Image (cartoon, rainbow, N blue to C red):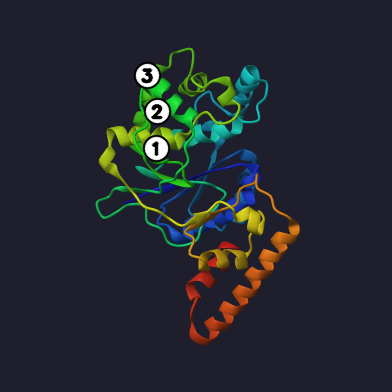
């Protein structure tokens, strides 16, 4: 299957996003990697990524007609007195709207920009079903929104919220069109979604593009996906900080993780991070010594170095 990858990158995630992009280039079969970000970040990626990378930069303010971050910030300030969560909602709407871009393949992999892939990964089974990584999270307001805005009940006994999701472009377009049909000339489909969220939930987390899309597909195209479990961790920052080096990446690979996230909201003591990094260095050097004797660990040593160039 031909597919592209899509990442939404904020200024806070630029550095870890470089490793995420390199990992997608190394470990997936992505035809193109689209980076949706503020235009002010274009120069950073143009300077930091080699020309051989199939990267395409998209201005986040030009993806959704009449909707940009400033518009959402004004909406949030008007409704709940603060715009702090506007960006969090904005990136979800951007990922959905990618389905309208003609340059994007019929399937596109949404990948969290703070998540580094650590081993080769496929996203379709032999019957061309999308492989979904189920989680146990349950947040009732997400399903209240889906019911209110689309009339759809929760369809499965697990959560679709993961660090990645392979999207069928036509299915996502159908979902967005469903929202558009329920909107009007006065409000956009984005505003329809936001208007359907209670103030108390809008302030925190009132909408999930993954839960919405997943349950929509589970209702209408239930045979188009299959579940598979992957070993991963969301606590990369707590162990190694926001800037993991090649020793840290190698250690995570050695532990068998498929991918690891480095979230900005997490924190850990500098002493703990320094100790973990020292352990990573010792493990790396030990495996490097064994590699020179037995040629073991060759692929992991090479990959960890490539991701941290």
Q: Nearer the viewer, residue 94 or 292?
A: 292
In the rendered view, tell whether residue 36 sits above or below residue 228.
Answer: above
Q: Earlier in the sequence, mark 2 or mark 1?
A: 1
- Which residue is at a point 65% across and 47% down the rendered structure image? 266
Query: What is the C-alpha distance between the residues marked 2 and 1?
Result: 16 Å
Q: In the image, is residue 50 above or below residue 160?
A: below
Placement of the C terminus among the 4 image quadrants? bottom right
* Category of crowding for the residue at label 1, using alpha-carbon neighbours closer than 10 angstroms: few (below 14), some (14–19), many (at least 20): few
How far apart are the two marked residues, 2 and 3, measured between alpha carbons? 9 Å
Judged left or right of residue 128, residue 278 is right
Q: Name the residue under label 1.
A: 102
Q: Residue at coordinates 46% horizontally, 41% vertically from top-left?
A: 161
Q: Which of marks 2 and 3 is nearer the N terminus?
A: 2
Where is residue 170? Give x, y as percent.
Answer: 33, 35
Q: Quadrant of residue 175?
A: top left
SS for dot 1: loop
Say if mark 2 contacts mark 1, CB within 8 Å.
Answer: no
- Residue 236 falls left or right of residue 255: right
Tell me whether the residue at label 2 lies in contact with that at label 3, contact meaning CB atoms closer than 8 angstroms: no
In the picture of the structure, the residue carrying the numbered disc 3 is: 181
The label nearer to you, 1 versus 3, is 3
| Residue in the picture at 36% in, 34% down | 215
Q: What element carries label 3?
A: helix
- Separation of marks 1 and 3 at Cα, in angstroms: 22 Å
Q: Name the residue under label 2.
A: 176
What x and y, as percent, mark residue 151?
A: 36, 22
Residue 54 appears in the rendering? yes
């Amino acid at each position: 299957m031909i597919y592209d990858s899509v990442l939404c990158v904020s200024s806070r995630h630029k550095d870890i996003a470089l490793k995420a992009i390199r990992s997608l280039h190394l470990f997936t079969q992505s035809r193109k990697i689209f980076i949706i970000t503020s235009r002010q970040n274009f120069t950073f990626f143009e300077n930091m990524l080699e020309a051989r990378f199939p990267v395409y930069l998209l201005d986040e303010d030009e993806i959704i007609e009449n909707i940009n971050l400033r518009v959402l910030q004004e909406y949030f300030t008007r409704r709940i007195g603060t715009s702090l969560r506007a960006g969090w909602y904005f990136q979800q709407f951007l990922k959905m709207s990618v389905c309208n871009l003609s340059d994007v393949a019929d399937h596109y992999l949404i990948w969290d920009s703070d998540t580094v892939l650590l081993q080769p990964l496929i996203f379709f089974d032999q019957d061309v079903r999308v492989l979904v990584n189920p989680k146990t999270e349950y947040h009732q307001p997400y399903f209240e929104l889906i019911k209110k805005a689309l009339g759809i009940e929760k369809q499965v006994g697990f959560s679709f919220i993961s660090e990645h999701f392979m999207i069928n472009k036509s299915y996502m377009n159908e979902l967005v069109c469903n929202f558009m049909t329920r909107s009007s000339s006065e409000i956009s489909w984005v505003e329809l979604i936001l208007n359907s969220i209670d103030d108390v939930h809008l302030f925190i987390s009132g909408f999930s593009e993954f839960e919405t899309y997943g349950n929509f597909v589970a209702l209408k195209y239930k045979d188009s996906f299959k579940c598979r479990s992957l070993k991963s961790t969301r606590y990369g920052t707590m162990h190694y900080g926001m800037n993991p080096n090649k020793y840290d990446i190698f250690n995570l690979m050695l532990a068998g993780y498929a991918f690891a996230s480095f979230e900005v909201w997490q924190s850990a003591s500098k002493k703990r991070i320094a100790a973990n990094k020292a352990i990573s260095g010792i493990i790396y050097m030990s495996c490097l010594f064994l590699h020179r004797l037995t040629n073991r660990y060759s692929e992991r040593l090479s990959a960890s170095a490539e991701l941290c160039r």
